[in-house]
Amino acid sequence: MTSNIAHKLEDSLFILLEANYDPEILKCSSYPYLLKQRIAGPNGHLPNSEAGKTISFLMNSGLNQVMLGHLSKENNFPELAYKTVVEELIESKLDFSKLKIDIADRYSPSKIIKVG
């Protein structure tokens, strides 16, 4: 996540944000080394912790709903993505009870999100 992209998301009430992987799980996964490097590299996927930091930044400009998406089937779990994001919010001293956090289902459409 670059600061430029994060600033373009400011004033969003809702975002669908990638929370693709947990770095520790990725390290131990069966993926080839080069694929692990690409996923974790600067042009790769967004780890759970970076998703949490991005959400923390955006809560200061009014964000109140988030859907975490594109979770890796092998390198993440919905509960872990949620927990990591909440821990980042707590570390940033933000009241995560003011934020609705959903996780996109891998196999079925998500519910309709009302924004506003």
Image: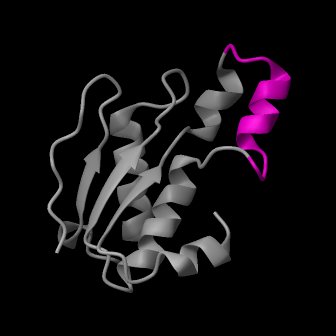
- Magenta span includes 31: yes
- Compared with 8, 107 (above or below) is above
Q: How is the image coloured?
A: one colour
- Compared with 60, 107 (above or below) is above
Residue lying at 57% horizontally and 58% vertically, measured from the top left = 50
- Compared with 10, 39 (above or below) is above
In the figure, is residue 79 to the left or right of 77? left
- Magenta span includes 74: no
Residue 93 seen in the current view: no
User: Which quarter of the rendering shows the N terminus?
Assistant: bottom right
Which residue, as the protein is rendered here, is positioned at the far top?
30
Residue 31 seen in the current view: yes
In the figure, is residue 4 to the left or right of 49? right
From which residue to which does the magenta span run? 30-43
In percent of width and height, residue 53 lies at 51, 66
In percent of width and height, residue 115 lies at 19, 68
In percent of width and height, residue 60 lies at 38, 85
In the figure, is residue 101 to the left or right of 24? left
Q: Nearer the viewer, residue 40 or 116?
A: 116
The image quadrant of residue 29 is: top right
Residue lying at 71% horizontally and 44% vertically, measured from the top left = 44
The image quadrant of residue 66 is: bottom left
